[in-house]
Image (spheres, helix red, strand yellow):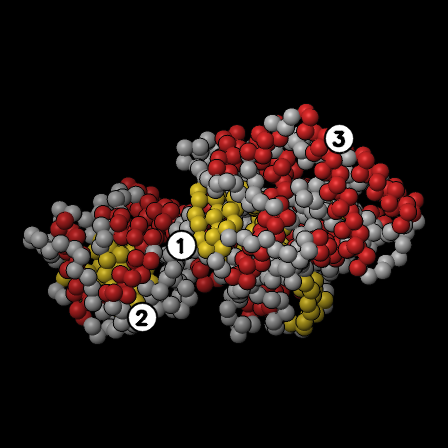
Amino acid sequence: MGFTDISNSGQRHKASELRIVLTGGRESKGNLCGRSSVGNIILGQNVFDTSMRTAQSETRQQEVYGRLVTVVDTPGWWWTDTQENTPKLDQIEIQNSVHLCPPGPHVFLLVIPVDLYLPHWVTSSLKEHLELFNADVFSHTIVLFAADAPCSDETIESKIRRSPTLQWILQRCGNRKHVLNISDRDDEDQVKMLFEKIDTMVTNNGGRHCPVDRRQGEALRKEITDLSERASRRFDQVQKQRRKLKELIEGGKPPPEHLRLVLIGAECEGKSSAGNTILGKTAFVVNNNGNRTTHCEISHSVVEGRWLTVVDSPGWFYINSLQDTSEMDKLEIEDSMDLCLPGPHAVLLVISLETAIHASYLRAVQEHMSLFGEEIWKHTLVLFTMSDWLGVKTVEDRIESEEGLQWIVNKCGNRYHVLNNMNHSDKTQVKELLEKIEEMWAGNKDPYYEVDLDRAAQIEAKKEAGDKMARRLKKINERQSRVLKELNGGEESPVTDIRIVLVGQKCSGKSRAGNMILFNNLFDLSFNMSRLKKNYQDQRETSTCVKHEGNFNGVKVSVVETPGWFTDTTSPDWIKGEVLHSVSMCPPGPHVFLLVVPISRAFTEKDLKALVEVLMPLTERVWRHCMVLFTWGDWLNDFPVENYIAREGKELQELLEKCGNRYHVLNPIQISGSIEVKKLLQKLIDIVTQNKGCFTTEDKQKTFQVQPWQKQLIEEEWNRRAQELVERILKVLAKEPEEPTVPSKRMTNSMNEFYIPDMSRDVASEYGSISEFRRGRAHDHVTEWLTNRERQSEISSGISSICLSATSMEKFERSPINKHSPKNSSFSQNNKEDSVSIISYPTRITGSPVSPNN
């Protein structure tokens, strides 16, 4: 089976020897379409072990069809990982592969399983990893599609047509490709045809093999030897250390019968699986469906005659600094120690062996461990997971290959253990882990890490206040939604098109959100990798607004993505110009600006300031058309988004207030994605209905054309509309269930702070002076009218924004909160407490990230 896509013109070069290097990303466990299986098919014998991952480059030779064929199998990398995220030990072995078939390989076979989906960013990952060979690899490469069943030429061609990534790869490889059915070893023709294609390629390359640098090969062999010697010395040191600690236990220092353990580490490192393996039962939910641990969980069991308490904790994003981690996650991580008072005997720092410990990863570990002080390291043991990644290598080899990993292990007193979470039948691995924990306990002056009880009380108080605030926020928003629906008379304006502009930082999820909204992979996701390789140069030449269109239930949807900026830099001035340009890209103007905020990281004052600044050229009117779009919704799992908002702090709450408390959560792994996008589009339609149209920069020009003699007529019209609005609101509130009343004096004080902004002109406000801006634009006569009306009727419900401090939430009476006017006027209340105000405009509330709007 194969393709006749390589020219057969001229005499085909057929050397007596053929040298082949197998390369490519890592296949999933149990997949027969791996490189080792391809090597066995080519050589006609089972010479490569397919039962475990290839962790080091291996060479096998065999005479095939009258010629000596050398095949080198190499370690694979994760297809989507950058070279920086590939462990250094794997990089060394990949580089060394070309030196195992001197004087160099004739061909690289890039093995790609037929059924493998390759996203856009695989191209940069592939290019970086092939550069490890330090040669012109693509001119010596054939793409080999590995199949475990018969596969027709049309099937492959159809797959290529649908995949821009495969098109790019084949273009770089001169469109050289071949299909190998590795489930049919009796089909000798498929191997013969592969050899013919290799010979043709070699002929086209002038009979040359891929050149290699001999000096580099010598340096690599020396590096591998030195690494192995250091690994051996570390192993000996660990054994000597353990013998001394065992003597302490045997000498009359029996370990406690009850051991308290806490699992901590970055996200997706296998903490929950490790907890289940240690306890010998399914105690913690494992992240099989993309759902992460969002709050601390505790479980108990009797293991090896010991009573164990194990606490699982949320992980941080693997390269996030402590400042980048959300308050929600930081509180839960800290709280993990408080669940096993008076403190844990051992903290298990979980690190997956597939993970590269580069500078960013090391910094994340150091900063998050600093939450517990320096003493934590005396009670910490490194627990390695994904042991199958080692292959024939030792964990000491892995440790010695990276300086960052050496620092962590040394900081833990050279204490570490490897756990295979896939092998639950091996009880010895847990038994040995518990022995190491007891040895650490015996060697410590303090028997356990002592929890700061004052800090524990503070954390508990913060969590309770946040939970209470979140419940109140959800209840208020539900009532707001009902009030808004009634104010609109239950009527929906016919909407035939929606124009959306996405605004946010780099790697915030704008492109993915755009693709989800359009139900099509139109926006390029490859720039997400820029987070790992930051470029602080002005990218104005390559970063511009991008527009794509689609259709949803008969509604034309246009999405414009604006360029992003790095989180730790100030947004460049040219981005403001691009955001302004986005308005003209969807004439007569966008209906909604979606401000994209990733839930996976903290939202800081700097983030708020950046968003305010990039929108500043559009004037204050733009906020009537803004909604916060939370991305990375899977980071929340079953955690309500209101809890995240309440815990994150005043900056996020202030952004929501400016956006009229409009927000939505997008979960990229949500099964019912179309339902969630439909809910988002319905919210956008509500905004269009409420705003009576779209945003346009022309409004500002028109307001300056108003003549002085017209102002009185405009004011009279506003007064009439405001009075009509209040009357409608009172009718709506009258339909609400009766609530306990409050003293009229208290309500009078509250009503004195109500306002309706003057919408007849735009006045740009400085960042941080929102209250002053509102007071300056208040309509005193409307405030007085509302106050008098309240004194007469003694109605207990207010129309205001809500300050979400714990104190004000206690004081706030149950009442519908709303805001509406023909020109988006708002009613507001200036809160004088040291807290965060939120919710000016009514909207629907989103529910949990798994199922928003529940």
Between disc 1 and disc 2, the foreground one is 1
Going by the numbered disc 3, the residue's amino acid type is Gly
Tell me residue 819's x, y (percent).
Answer: 72, 47
Classify mark 1: residues with Cα within 10 Å, few (<14), some (14-19) or many (20+): some
Q: Which residue is mark 2?
A: 148
Position above or below: 343 against 837: below
Say whether disc 3 or disc 1 marks the residue closer to the N-terminus.
Answer: 1
Tell me residue 312's x, y (percent).
Answer: 64, 61
Q: Is residue 767 visible?
A: no
Between disc 3 and disc 1, the foreground one is 3
The numbered mark at residue 371 is: none
Classify mark 2: residues with Cα within 10 Å, few (<14), some (14-19) or many (20+): some
Q: Which residue is mark 3?
A: 776
Q: Is residue 103 left or right of residue 658?
A: left
Q: Which residue is mark 1?
A: 119
Position above or below: 306 against 637: below
**Residue ranking furthest to the top:** 708
